[in-house]
Image (cartoon, rainbow, N blue to C red):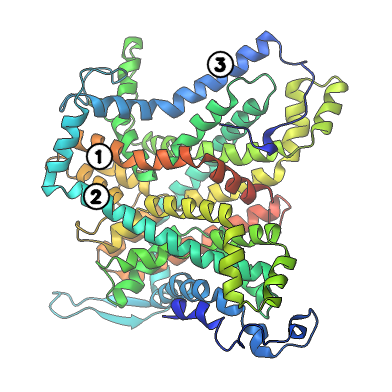
Amino acid sequence: MINVAAPADARTGKRPPGIRPPATTRPGAPRPRARRLRPLWFCAPFLALFAAMYVAPIVYAAVSSLFTVHRSGLGLTAPSKVFDPLGNYARALHDGAFTGALGRVALFGVVQVPLMLCLALALALLIDAKSARGKGFFRLAGFLPYAIPGVSAALVWSFMYSSQSSPINRLLAPLGVSVPFFDGHLVLWSVANIVTWSWVGYNMIIIYSALQAIPAEVLEAARMDGASALRVAWSIKVPAIRGALVLTAVFSIIGSAQLFNEPTVLRPVSGGAISSSFTPLMSAQSAVAAGNYPYAAAQSVVLAVLVGVVSFVFLKLTGRGGKA
Amino acid sequence: MSAPAWRTSPARSPRGTGPVSRTVTTALLGLSAVYFLFPLWWLLVSATKPFGEQFSGSGLWFGGFGLFGNIARLTSQDGGIFWRWMANSVLYCGVGALLGTAFSALAGYALAKFDFPGRGAVFGVVLAAVLVPKVLFTLPLYLMFSGVHLINNPLAVLLPSVVSPFGVYLSRVFAAQTIPDEVLEAGRIDGAGEFRIFRAIGVRMMLPALVTIFLFQFVEVWNNYLLPAMVLGDDRLQPVTVGLVGWNASHVAVPPPLVVIGSLVSVVPLVIAFLALQRFWRAGLTAGAVK
């Protein structure tokens, strides 16, 4: 539709080549409004699809979350929708499964994000250290998990965790240790391990790129002053890459909030440790499965608002309100 | 692989590279490599074992060779649906990434090279959208698509895949850096239309960035599980990620070894793409992080 017509429009209405006087293209020369708006056609395909695939669904969800579904007792008549702007939100806040999922993901974020970023930072500093050998290999090894789709990573790890065949537990068997990966208390951290495995390398590469941008003279000067490698890393390198650390932290916080793939893949083999509303997104999806779309929409809106608030507060606290 | 210019640093003094610190550094890095590679190694080893022995033994070393037999079994399961899933994945990712790259290039080029009313607003929207995760839009998208009866239609996966705010951002940054205004001005004086100038000059100069955008888009669509899982109920339309999770969840009907083998086969194209295009994605990540 628009996307096809748009680029062509930039050409139509143009005088034949050669006839147009060059003077009209001189910078600063007054141009008719239509000509000035023409570049907007270049953006039209993107903007049209953006409006349809980003803005419209959010508006649709926000509006539909204002209605509650009422079913007749016997389910013989079609369920009716009643305008009740706060009904679904009140229900969500009193829904133990949903608030439990929010709490679980918050705990996950508070523990997993700092742990993963510390690991990523440590690896980046090690690879950046002068004493490191085989930098290319280690960088690639760390990044390889990122190339594995999240779902495939979760599938592979589900075999690592499997109570019958876990190769990790086989390795630990001589020590008399066996890790119950699907234990009710441990299962959240089994999920955290998969997420960490997938994303450490990605964050490591971003942090490493930032480390590479530190001027060599600064590091050299510190060494001349007799600072040890650890001291240089802690007092010069880490402060210098603050921006990259904040950026990776924000992306990781957002990532935690959308936790879905890993627990969903582990669920059938978890022996009940992972419930159908383990994370907020899973909870919303089970509302969809139950046919209650407005309630699912309300849960999505609550989650989106919470993610926005947490990211915003984090950016404010770290003193980088603008773009990182 | 050759070291790009930004990695080389001036020669530093050899201090701090004593045998002790070198050993500690290498040991720690080695440990990390074991963590990262262990599951992938297990996957490779298990998938090559004869069928049915996937979960026996320590899983750390090869035992017998049955890779080809395993792939044959994978192919015959459920009437060859695995390859249909692979084809679906390639189709969704290829078309989504191609159109997404084209639209991103157009918009990014216009944002970098033209001054027009609303330019600041458009770029602000793009930046805000880069920070918002796509997954949060999935449920609302599903609700909207079911409102307009697009469920079980490949368009429901393709249309959202085509929108890439990060692609627009990256092509804007790249176009601003690499395309000199004088070249475009020369084209205009020669009487070429703006779209023709974009095609002939813009696209050519932005090519490295466009490859990066294509790769990232491709991987992003390939990784997206929730959206296709929700909007495509018909298993003949599903991508390979959704199909394999379905097999895994039905572990009575489909033997688990097939999930192991399918996982390996589905991961190989992406790993090869990443290794082959290292230069591009690394530059792309750097552009996103440092600038």
Q: Quadrant of residue B118?
A: bottom right
Q: Secondary structure at mark 3?
A: helix
Q: Is residue A163 above or below residue B4?
A: above
Residue appearing at x 49%, y 44% in the figure: A107
Q: Nearer the viewer, residue A165 or B52?
A: B52
Left or right of A266 on screen, residue B284: right
CB atoms of marks 1 and 2 within 8 Å? yes
Q: Mark yes or no: residue B246 visible.
A: no
Amino acid at dot 1? Gly
- Label 1 neighbourhood size at 10 Å, few (<14), some (14-19), many (20+)? many
Q: Is residue B199 above or below residue A102?
A: below
Give residue A123's position: percent from left, percent from top. Answer: 59, 29
Q: Is residue A146 above or below residue A8?
A: above
**Circle 1 sits on which residue?**
B262
Mark 1 and mark 2: Cα distance apart in space: 10 Å
Q: Are marks 3 and 2 on the same chain?
A: yes
Lower sequence index among marks 3 and 2: 3
**Circle 3 sits on which residue?**
B27
Q: Chain of mark 1?
A: B
- Label 3 neighbourhood size at 10 Å, few (<14), some (14-19), many (20+)? few
Q: Chain of mark 3?
A: B
Left or right of B136 on screen, residue B119: right
Q: Chain of mark 2?
A: B
Left or right of A103 on screen, residue A227: right
Lower sequence index among marks 3 and 1: 3
